Image (tube, rainbow, N blue to C red):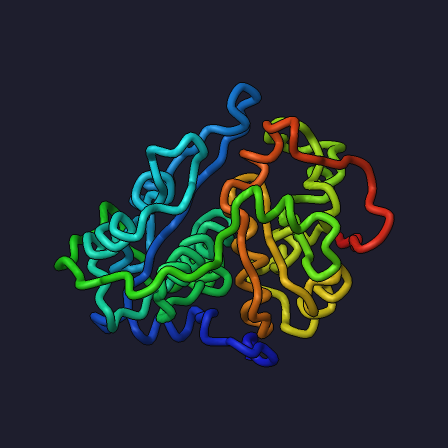
Amino acid sequence: MTTSGFVRPEFLVETDWLADHLSDQNVLAFDCTTHLIPDPKITYQVVPGREDFEKGHIPGAQFIDMLRDVSDTSHRFRFMRQAPDDFAAAMRRFGVNTATRVVTYSTANAWWATRMWWLLRVFGFDNAAVLNGGWQKWSREGRPTETGPANPRPPGDFTVREVRDLMVDKSQVLAAIGDSGVCTLNALLPQQHTGSGGNSYGRPGRIAGSVNLPAAHLVDPETNIFLPADELRKRFAAVGALDKQVITYCGGGIAASADALALVMLGHTDVRLYDASLSEWAVDPTLPMETGPMKTGSIETS
């Protein structure tokens, strides 16, 4: 079983389980597909995956526009966490109830699904899981699909019962630099971490003192499923992320949520996410950044 070895395996759902529960009105799949198209002027253009959804989606799924439906559209940075009331209203519109089992997936990178899972967790909702392997595995296995827009669901009764302290701001990240009790973890690709290539969010490179375990290195590139628990534990241990508080970041708080999910599934109890990430940090010249290879603490993965 793929989820064996995880302390919190309930946050990952297999395709066979979802296929067996498609007719269950208490199970709701969210397609979170989003595409980032590189644009040097503004880093990237955000293209919601609605067109992908209408070409094919898991039966009964709802399409979530991650930029407009569940982000604060008034904020200067994209994909920032909403106010609790706004998030709750969005979940009610999509038919989420207290008893709903939410399963998130994407036809693109897995971290759009993990970002939605993280938002639900922030707002006190634990009955959510990420579909292991996403749309890629579902379609590869020849499972049922639908086309066209989502069928509307009756409004749900979702409410925010608590707001968990799982997001940090730049002042907390700044305070963590040089603190041996905190691991600041970059989920971007190695070339972005070193500043040698890839998409840049302003100044190239990484937050000073941070280590690197890319979200892309948490899944099998052939199958899109999460690596086994033992392998993930080995990779996080190599960057010093298992035995201290962790702050995950990336370009805009999306890929960072995949590292956060994996750590939580491994049993880590003190993981937070820097919501604005490099979208904020890299454009503020008062905030320290580094480039070049890491002297210690980073691992090379292929």
Residue 21, horizontal then vertical, whole percent: 30, 74
Left or right position of 206 against 126: right
**238 is higher (above) or lower (below) than 2:** above
Left or right position of 227 against 10: right
Residue 138, horizontal then vertical, whole percent: 43, 61
- Which image quarter: residue 183? bottom right
**19 is higher (above) or lower (below) than 219:** below
Q: Which residue is at the front of the view, 202 or 148?
A: 202
Residue 3, horizontal then vertical, whole percent: 54, 76
Identity of the residue furthest to the top in this view? 41
Left or right position of 9 against 212: left
Q: Residue at x 56, y 75 (%)?
A: 2
Q: Which residue is at the front of the view, 120 or 13?
A: 120
Residue 175, horizontal then vertical, whole percent: 64, 48
Identity of the residue furthest to the right in this view? 295
Q: Residue at x 85, y 53 (%)?
A: 296
**48 is higher (above) or lower (below) than 268:** above
Left or right position of 88 against 227: left
Q: Residue at x 76, y 36 (%)?
A: 290
**The N terminus - image quarter:** bottom right
Q: Which residue is at the front of the view, 45 or 16?
A: 45
